[in-house]
Amino acid sequence: MQLDSKVMDIVARVFDSHLPTREEIITLLNIAPHSTEAGFVMASADAINRTSSNGKAEIHAQIGVNLSPCPRNCSFCSFAAKNKVFTERNELPVEDAIQMALKAEEDGANSIFFMATGDFSLKKFVEISKEVKTNLKPETVMIANVGDFNDEEGRWLKEAGYIGMYHAVRMGEGRETSISPEVRLRTVKAARDTELLIGTCVEPIGPEHSVDEIAEKTLIGRDMEPCFSGAMRRISVPGSELEKFGMVSEYRMAFLVAVVRIAMGRKLIGNCTHEPNILGATAGANLFWAEVGTNPRDTEVDTSKGRGLNIESCIDMFREADFDMLSGPSVIYSQDNVLY
Ligand code: SF4
């Protein structure tokens, strides 16, 4: 039995620090599912992933701070006004946000993300963040997952104690959302201008997405010079127009996580998958999210009562995948993890 020499050559060169071209990423994405080559790609991504992170996985906790029927109307999001999952508008009391953050700290999260809907006032987000920050250990890493912002607003986030942000040009951006890719990329530039580290991901992937678009979004993410990438599947929002397409299996997602891991080169420390699963952790993911508060993939107001996993469950999965856990502040979100 012989493996496809083209696939072997691409992967071998990534082990030698090559960054795959668009055509090479497409070649990998087109590998037949369940084939020996697909297994080779997943095993290679696993090896690269464990080496880049010294075999240490990270858990980042995400706290959703508000609920809104969001007018940006991203078809895949349960906050989208048109999906009619949430009709009320409210926000987490600051004291609850503080308690959730303290719990995440105590349970061993390597960073804490604060997430707000795309229409939430950034001024208010910054006020809440400042109050939470004063209650946390000085070394706790805070990351913002918010809507689009400009340079001035980026500076507000820095002043509130954020060292990084999460942002992506999502699958179907401008088609399944009312936000253009250019607006998303302007925010990435604002983050860079204000020295916020950028985490990204190829998301949310559904069965209907083409190999070309997955490759395109992988490369857009790589061009952001992020501290991590990864891949996440779309969770069907009941009643949404995308529900008819269904969801990608965890097995397929593990393969896509592997391709993204390889596409990002061997040096980048972080590669995530969401939602957390063991297959992903054995095919190139070393970063999971634990979630509390609101969640754009859930129909529960507090995702800890719905889809959101806690830190302990994420740690259990990584341990079952033979990872050690990083103790202390995130290495992924650190100034040393800047590669290109
Ligand atoms: S993904 Fe963000 S911007 Fe889009 S509808 Fe949901 S909350 Fe609004």
Image (cartoon, rainbow, N blue to C red):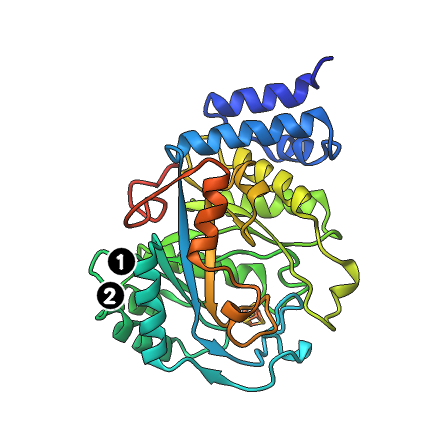
Three-letter residue code for mark 2: Leu
> Do the CB atoms of the residues marked 1 and 2 lie less than 8 Å apart?
yes
Q: Which mark is residue 92?
A: none
How far apart are the alpha carbons under marks 1 and 2?
A: 7 Å
In the picture as drawn, the residue positioned furthest to the bottom comes out as 88
Write down which quadrant ligand 1 falls in. bottom right
- Depicted 156 relative to depicted 212: above or below: below
Residue 339 found in image quarter: top left
Mark 2 element type = loop
Q: Is residue 161 left or right of residue 230?
A: left
Q: Nearer the viewer, residue 7 or 294?
A: 294
**Residue 19 in view:** no
Q: Quadrant of residue 206?
A: bottom right
In the image, is residue 76 above or below residue 127? above
Q: Nearer the viewer, residue 152 or 74?
A: 74
Task: Give me the disc on residue 140.
Answer: 1
Viewer-nearest residue: 67 or 110 = 110
Q: Residue at x 40, y 32 (%)?
A: 52
Q: Is residue 320 visible?
A: yes
Q: Residue at x 75, y 69 (%)?
A: 241
| Percent x, y of residue 192 | 36, 54
Relative image position of residue 201 (x, y in whole percent):
52, 50
Q: Considering the image in quadrants, where does the N terminus appear?
A: top right
Q: Quadrant of residue 153?
A: bottom left
Residue 141 on image: x %, y %: 30, 57
The residue tagged 2 is 136
Residue 174 appears at what percent x and percent y?
A: 64, 63
In the picture provided, is 102 more to the left or to the right than 27?
A: left
Rendered view: 157 above or below 256: below
What is the secondary structure assignment of the residue under circle 1? loop
Q: Amino acid at mark 1?
A: Thr
Side of 295 relative to 80 (left or right): left
